[in-house]
Amino acid sequence: MNNLSRFLASDFFYKFRRSPVAVIAFIVTVFLVLSAVLAPLLATQNPFDPGSLNLMNGFSKPGVPNDFTGETFMLGTDDQGRDIYSTILYGLRVSLFVGFSAVVFAMVLGATLGLIAGYTGGRTDTIIMRIADIQLTFPAILVALLIFGIAKGITPPSYRDEVAIWVLIIAIGLSDWVQFARVVRGATLVERNKEYVQAAKLIGRSPFSIMIKHILPNTLGPVLVIATISLALAIIAEATLSFLGVGAPPTQPSLGTLIRIGQGFLFSGEWWILFYPAMTLLLLALSVNLLGDWLRDALNPKLK
Amino acid sequence: MLAYVIRRVFQSLFVLLMVGLVAFSMFRFVGDPVDNLLGQERTQADIERVREQLGLNDPFPIQYVKFLGNVTRGNFGVSYRQGRPVADIIAERAPATLELAGVSALLAVVFGVGLGVFTAIRRDGIVANFIMTTSLIGVSLPTFLIGILLIYIFAVELGWLPSFGRGETVQLGWWSTGFLTESGLKAIILPAITLGLYQMTLIMRLVRAEMLEVLRTDYIKFARARGLSERAINFGHALKNTMVPVITVTGLQIGSIIAFAIITETVFQWPGVGLLFINAIQFVDIPVMAAYLMLISVMFVLINLIVDLLYFAIDPRLSADASSRGH
């Protein structure tokens, strides 16, 4: 309880409470994450179990009883009678899982390389940062597309759907590690020359333990900010790739896949198949983005 | 100065060689090229003949050099899916992408600079604040959703503009243009807005920030004291001095426009290079992927090089810095 009360009394929490935008963004994010985690409990059906679908329910309008079966679907159904509300919950799951995993992957990779580059310096530093510079000249989405394409070429066709999610995570993660590496390297360069690091060196700590136990904790503030902003970018990147038809497989549709499917019904008047997944994606991206923006300002010592 | 230019050029060449190596490895190791070219009914003799023809029996470095030689002559191999030379397919698709990118860039610059100046001058006005808030939302909207929204409003509800394709095109030599027909002009409006919107907001925010900075300086106060008209101060003095960063950022964004064209082209089924690339990924058409990768890398590297060298030409402090380090 001591930690909690200390947190509640902190400067950070005070600032958070005083910012309505941050509070709302936080509540929306938590709400969406919880619904994704609890999707199997909240959903009215498992939309990807063909046994639970009834084709007669196809194209039910939102909130109106179906003409044939009399069943009512809050957000309507698609052409195969899948409940849009349930597909959104499951899609949210895939989107958030890919987003979180990609950011964690990028964070671990970037922070490791940044620590090594900053701590060892010299040629290692030059090589790592030069690669980062080169990658930064290409837009992340292009890098992710390319990695996805190559990975697809390497895996045998029968496995492609199974590994697609993991390929997606690696592709988005690899396209996003540079930010983390740059920030951690910068912070490491500053910390490296401080007295506590010199002292740790003197008592014979190994470079590995100095990097992990002493320097890394001091770089976490900016890393947290970048991770939050990266999460919004990763969610959008995943949705974009899936929308382009090169992301999540049809067996595990994400929000992007749902929007891709929904676009096909735009002209025939079934707007709800597109509208609700799109709004969910928008809400998710916007609230995570706002949270990241707020965090950046709140943790910035210059703005105190 | 010269040393810097030479170093920069070598760096760029090195990047291109690395990209070439990635592209070449894709050819060589992703799937078996022989499998991809020969059908089911092949004999061992066929396989040997094709291996010899493609030079697959040569050592790796020699294969790589041969590959680079082919690429510099514009020979990117044959598409697995269409069975035609990749260079021909890309040449056929390039005009569509270049016209779309050109119109988007133009929209982005004209509206970006215009709105940027407006929001800087009327800093506290209601309209300016509204534009700034809307632009924030616009930045966090994914490109493909903007495209779909525009299609919904202007193609589905209002029915004013087409939702896909390029309309009728006119062939001018090898270049097919959509600018000369009414349907072609109508078709480019929605994709160009979708593609240019992000860059427009970027330029607008940059121009606004730079303008606010410049409007605070002494020479603007002096210009006011001299009794110059607002128009002469804002456009003749202030805007002129914000142009250096705006030009460099716009230059760097040209590459992004071409890259993001992939998304816009998919939303609007615009028959350009980006759509070609997405289809190539879906069908694992390696030669097309490799060719696109190399073309876009050459473009990015060239743009970066030119912008870096332009900095030198524009900002004398940089060259002074470099020469003092050299001694």
Image (spheres, grey):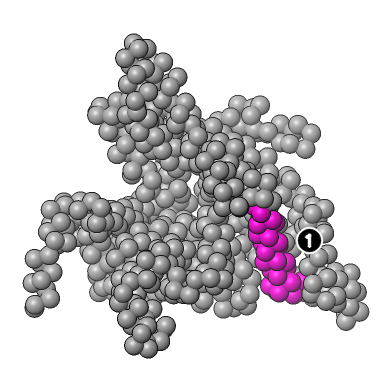
Quarter residue A186 falls in: bottom left
Residue for point 25% across, 59% down: A299
Residue B101 appears at what percent x and percent y?
Answer: 58, 39
Amino acid on which the number 1 mark rests in the picture: Leu
Is A257 left or right of B216, judged from the image as shown?
right
Say above or below: A175 vs A216: above
Question: On the rendered structure, is A73 left or right of B231?
Answer: left
In the image, the segment drawn in magenta is: B7-33
Q: Above or below — where is A69 with respect to B269? A: below
Using the image as rendered, state which of residue A123 and residue A152 is in the foreground: A123
Find out whether residue A198 is within the magenta segment.
no
Q: Is residue B58 above or below residue B115?
A: below
Query: Is any part of residue B77 visible from this angle?
Result: no
Whether residue B8 appears in this view of the structure is: yes
Q: Secondary structure at mark 1?
A: helix
Residue B299 lies, with reference to residue A192, above or below; the image says above
Identify the residue shown where x is 39% and y is 27%: B117
Which residue is located at x 25 percent, y 53 percent? A302
x 56%, y 63%: residue: A130
Query: Hey, which quadrant is residue A235 in on the image?
Result: bottom left
Quadrant for the N terminus of chain B in the image: top right
Q: Nearer the viewer, residue A81 or A255?
A: A255
Q: Residue furthest bottom?
A: A204
Q: Position of residue A204 (x, y in %)?
A: 37, 88
Which chain is mark 1 on? B
Q: Which residue is mark 1?
A: B68
Disc 1 crowd rating (10 Å Cα; few below 14, some 14-19, many 20+) is some
Spot occupied by residue B225 in the image (x, y as percentages of width and height): 31, 14
Q: Main secondary structure of the magenta part?
A: helix
Q: Specify whether residue B29 is painted magenta.
A: yes
- Residue A25 horizontal/vertical position (percent): 23, 56
